[in-house]
Image (cartoon, rainbow, N blue to C red):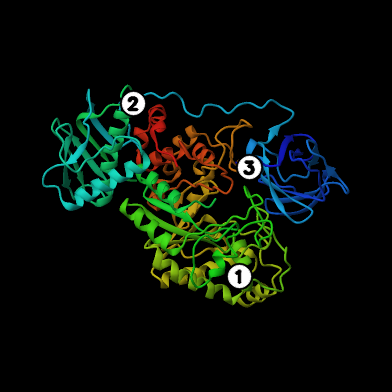
Amino acid sequence: MTVAPYRLESSWHPLGGPNGRFTFSLFNLSDVALSGFTLVYTSLTRVVDPKACENATFLRRNANFHEFAPPKRFSLEPGKSWTFTASGLHRPARHCTDGAKSAYVTLADGTHVTIAVSDLLLEGRVNEPPPVLLPEGRLELPFSLQPFPAEIDAKPGDSFPVVLYPAEGSSADDLRAVSTVLSLCRRLFESDHTPFNLVASPQGRALQFLVDATIAPEGYKLAFFPSQITLSFADAAGRQYGLTSLAQLLHGARSQPQTFRFPVSGTISDVSRQFYPTADIKRLIDILAWLKLNIFHWHLTDDEAWRLEIKAYPELTATGVLRGPDEPLLPQLGNCAEPVGGFYSQDDVRDIVAHAATLSVEIIPEIDIPGHSTATLTALPDLTDGQEAPESYHSVQGYPNNALNPAVPLTYEFLEKVFDEMVELFPSSYLHIGGDEVANGSWLASPLAKTLMEKEGISGTFALQSYFLKRVKEMLTARGRKLAGWNEVAHGGGVAARDTLLMAWENPPVGIDLAKEGYEVVMTPGQAYYLDMVQAEAFQEPGASWAGTVPPAHTYAYEAEGDFPEELKDRMKGVQACIWSEHFLSRGYFNRLVFPRLPAIAEAAWTPRAMKDWHRFAAIAPLSPKL
């Protein structure tokens, strides 16, 4: 491993500016003096006042990308440091991950060299360590089940079978289902003993499969007897979930026999209520299946990159996917001197969709339009109004002019071709089109947009967005697909509520308001279900904080359905966990933030409120597989 020749250390002090002050120190760990250079770092906490700097010149910013120059004729000698401050911040730094996430220097000859980056330190008060997120846990029933079932009347045994195996007479579909869950267990717990065997074992217990049309879709019932177990179900998903529950029970009893047991008698029943490589996506789908979560909402495009191969527009995964110092897309959170890219080929997508289907997981793809389209517009500049000023508006993340223009005719031709390819790749009845975070003021400096608004008799950004999304919905309807989107799809008049599913993310009341307007709703409020949010107030706790602090106990306790009036509950179609990973810089960071809150949301989806128990959950959650 090569040691970085430079290191950037930083701290934040609450005094020194309206939102505090950053202090940066660049250390030269090389043997050569450094001069004629510039420093780039990426950070969630952005500098918005270029003049509020000391001992440095602020050169430019693009969203989270910041570039500074040292004083003229400055030379940084080996073993020495250059210190400067920036106090014109757009918000205070609240946590250790709010400082520089990545950095590089550009040398006098144009070469870019990655810098090692230290965690942000807190000046002016004590750096308290993050608290323990889960209590020790307490069990009334010693069974490891995630999520916990709706009904359980089972007696724990003193031992457990070595394996479970299909009883004689099981169908070929039953055998395939066992093999599928057996393979899932092997992928998630590579070194553990597998729970199933297709061949009968004298040390095992037979598993009898029964089709029962009275059981709800995705539901199952397990009955435990001394010589066998009976699994009753109505459909393939229910059979799979029942097998997964058996695997969880056996996994807990085998791995922690002092805590967990396997049932000897009784019944269990339930009814359902940054670029990642393909292998990581498939493992995440495996984890969803283990937790009996049945939808994978795949966010494939954003300002940072377009990740889905579209054969009609190869530029999207060439120009529109590569970020780097000398690329059309500048580095953003976590990017250093080396260019980064990555996209999913259509063969990758087919492989992932097929993998998910074997586990009863449906994939709903998302391309985020009209906002969050910096990468698209960089790859396809013909989609812009060339008469529009280049920085006439900025998104909340700081991207200039990042929304597809509804007044550019080529926009609709582009989307027609994209949708044609997407419906061939994704069999889901829904296609998610984003619709979120379009900046108020977007397109108002576009002559083409002004002409269109005058012609259609509409005014303002959101009325124009509504016009655009209504045309998008027509395209999807013509292709046999329903529109899914974020809650802002309803802005400016929205689209027709029929065959429209909206994700309410800004806060819980938004979801209720959407239901009152006739929309079907998935509840995913940032205040409970956004897994990139910090889990404690402590400065040393990593994560974002725009939605506040979201400890696992709050995520577990929150009941989205409880907010809905009785007459609107039929319009709440589910809950969703969101993992926004643009600033997840490591696997450990991902796992710390996503677990145990993802299993907590699985219980919100499956487990009736009366059956929820925080201390039981805390005892079982550590058994969950991680990425």
Q: Hey, what amino acid is under mark 1?
A: Leu
Q: Quadrant of residue 262?
A: top left
Q: CA distance from mark 2 to mark 3?
A: 41 Å
Residues at discs 3 and 1 in contact (Cβ within 8 Å)? no
Most extreme residue toward the right, as rendered? 73
In the displayed structure, 577 sits above or below 418; it is above
Q: Nearer the viewer, residue 481 or 377?
A: 377
- 322 on left or right of 473: right
Query: Residue 259 placed where, x, y %?
Result: 33, 23
Screen quadrant of the C terminus: top left
Query: Residue 4 placed where, x, y %?
Result: 67, 42
Residue matched to label 2: 256
Q: Nearer the viewer, residue 532 or 322?
A: 322
Most extreme residue toward the left, as rendered? 169
Which is nearer the N-term, disc 2 or disc 3? Answer: 3
- Residue 516 seen: no
- Of badges 3 and 1, nearer the viewer stands 3
In the displayed structure, 399 sits above or below 606; it is below
Q: Hey, what amino acid is under mark 3?
A: Thr
Crowding at dot 2, Cα within 10 Å, few <14 / some 14-19 / many 20+, comes out as few
Residues at discs 2 and 3 in contact (Cβ within 8 Å)? no
Secondary element type, mark 2: loop
On residue 380, the disc is: 1
On residue 2, the disc is: 3
- 96 on left or right of 530: right
- Residue 58 seen: yes
Residue shown at the point (20%, 52%) measured from the top left: 173
Crowding at dot 3, Cα within 10 Å, few <14 / some 14-19 / many 20+, comes out as few
